[in-house]
């Protein structure tokens, strides 16, 4: 049995519970000082005063010294597209020159461009590239991440993406939640046969995606993507195959995606830039987690989702990067925190809840991660800052000093020596 104790904790900062927080509860973090955390075999056993553990056998106990710094749960990124090949820097320049994301997509760019690169990439290359992206995420304090397929739009490549995620889940310290997103776009070969593609996804790809380890089924329900009726069919068939529904909703236009998410019992509805008040009401009634993606809005120069408004209306709000090669080529948690607090008017406490416990709930893991409590995995970050509020105060700067995953240190900041 591996037994460790985290001591010299300046601030222990965490939400509490095994379910999402909503409304004013999102602002209610537990912040305590001079605490210690006992860890056995990667799981938190007890949280208490340092004096509570003086009778433990020092020879069998590894001590992790937090250096008087703040300690938080590991961050959770519940919406990413990190498994892809190829880059779209030229499209970013085109947007800087004034073209819209939709215009670029109509000219053969957008998702179609990434599909071509990802289809051509061998499994080994795709896995290597994805592994490097996970390395970058860890240094920002991410210990659990959701990843989507959707850059194949054929059976072979969609399953290749899911296989890469499952292998990296087993081979890297991060926990990875795989999502099947075969309904990301209509591929060019089906451009004039939409119904056939929906049938293909349902009949030919959903069942093996579930069998190969996907946990969720997602659909891009929006203008220019999939209609509400097409999305309903795919999500309901995914449920029959054992996949939990998620939905990309109302990013480009208010098409009723949020309402559909509530109807099918989605675990989360993501984006929500153009969602109506009735849509918000329905996802609240059905306990759907609202996953907001402000870096995407920033990258596309769109208005931000109404984060504070949603919280004030009692919705459970989470945050994610939406890391992808096109509309949001960024895995930056510091940027995410800055945009949340400065432009969506969320408090730093609400932002932390959104990136920990509520993010865990958005990927069906709130019973095992997302807070620092007995029974949860010992997924922790130690900040290189005097106070947790520096996460928003020190704008856009990575303050993560150390990352502990299931009791093991997996990343530590290197300090350059100035002479």
Image (cartoon, helix red, strand yellow):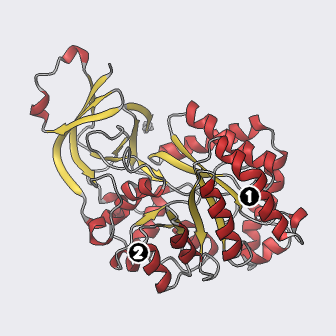
Question: Do the residues bearing badges 2 and 1 touch, measured as CB atoms within 8 Å?
Answer: no
User: Picture coordinates of residue 176 (x, y %)?
Assistant: 54, 43
Residue 192 lies left or right of residue 126; in this view the side is right
User: Picture coordinates of residue 246 (x, y %)?
Assistant: 56, 62
Can you name the residue that lies furthest to the bottom here?
277
Q: How many marks?
A: 2
234 above or below 75? below
Which residue: 42% across, 38% down? 415
Q: Which mark is first along the chain, 1 or 2?
A: 1
Q: Which residue is mark 2?
A: 285
Residue 162 lies left or right of residue 396; in this view the side is right
User: Crowding at label 2, few (<14), some or many (≥20) Cα neighbours within 10 Å?
Assistant: few
Which residue: 53% across, 72% down? 263
User: Picture coordinates of residue 409 (x, y %)?
Assistant: 40, 32
Tag 2's secondary structure? helix
Q: Check the picture and name the quadrant holding the C terminus.
A: top left
User: Picture coordinates of residue 224 (x, y %)?
Assistant: 74, 76
Tag 1's secondary structure? helix
Quadrant of residue 10 within the rendered picture: top left
Which residue: 39% across, 80% down? 309
Q: Check the picture and name the quadrant holding the N terminus.
A: top left
Quadrant of residue 254 within the rendered picture: bottom right
Mark identifier at residue 167? none
Q: Which residue is mark 1?
A: 202
Given residues 214 and 265, the one toward you in this image is: 265
State how far apart marks 2 and 1 are (Cα).
28 Å
Which residue: 54% across, 75% down? 258
Can I make out residue 328 in this image? no
């Amino acid at each position: 049995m591996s037994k460790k104790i985290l001591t010299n904790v300046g601030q222990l900062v965490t939400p509490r519970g095994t379910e999402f927080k909503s409304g004013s509860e999102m602002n209610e973090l537990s912040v305590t000082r001079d605490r210690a955390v006992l860890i056995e075999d990667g799981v938190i056993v007890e949280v208490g005063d340092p004096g509570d553990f003086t009778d433990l056998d020092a020879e069998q106990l590894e001590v992790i010294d937090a250096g008087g710094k703040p300690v938080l749960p590991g961050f959770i990124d519940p919406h990413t597209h990190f498994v892809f090949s190829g880059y779209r820097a030229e499209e970013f320049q085109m947007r800087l020159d004034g073209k819209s994301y939709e215009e670029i997509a109509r000219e053969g760019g957008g998702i179609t461009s990434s599909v071509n690169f990802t289809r051509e990439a061998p499994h080994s290359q795709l896995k290597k590239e994805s592994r490097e992206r996970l390395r970058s995420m860890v240094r920002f304090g991410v210990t659990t991440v959701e990843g989507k397929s959707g850059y194949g739009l054929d059976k072979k490549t969609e399953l290749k993406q899911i296989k890469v995620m499952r292998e990296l889940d087993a081979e890297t310290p991060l926990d990875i939640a795989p999502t099947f997103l075969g309904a990301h776009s209509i591929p060019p070969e089906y451009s004039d046969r939409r119904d056939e593609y929906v049938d293909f996804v349902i009949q030919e790809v959903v069942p093996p995606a579930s069998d190969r380890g996907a946990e969720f089924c997602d659909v891009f329900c929006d203008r220019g993507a999939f209609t509400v009726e097409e999305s309903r069919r795919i999500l309901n068939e995914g449920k029959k195959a054992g996949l939990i529904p998620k939905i990309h909703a109302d990013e480009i236009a208010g098409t009723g995606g949020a309402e559909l998410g509530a109807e099918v019992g989605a675990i989360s509805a993501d984006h929500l830039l153009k969602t109506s008040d009735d849509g918000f009401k329905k996802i609240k009634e059905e306990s759907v987690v609202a996953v907001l993606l402000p870096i995407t809005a920033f990258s596309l120069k769109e208005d931000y989702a109404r984060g504070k408004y949603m919280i004030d209306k009692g919705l459970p709000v989470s945050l994610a990067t939406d890391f992808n090669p096109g509309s949001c080529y960024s895995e930056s948690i510091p940027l995410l925190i800055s945009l949340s607090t400065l432009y969506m008017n969320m408090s730093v406490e609400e932002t932390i809840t959104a990136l920990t416990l509520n993010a865990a709930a958005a990927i069906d893991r709130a019973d095992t991660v997302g807070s620092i409590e007995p029974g949860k995995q010992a997924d922790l970050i130690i900040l290189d800052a005097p106070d947790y509020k520096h996460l928003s105060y020190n704008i856009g700067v990575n303050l993560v000093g150390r990352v502990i995953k299931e009791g093991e240190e997996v990343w530590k900041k290197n300090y350059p020596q100035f002479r």
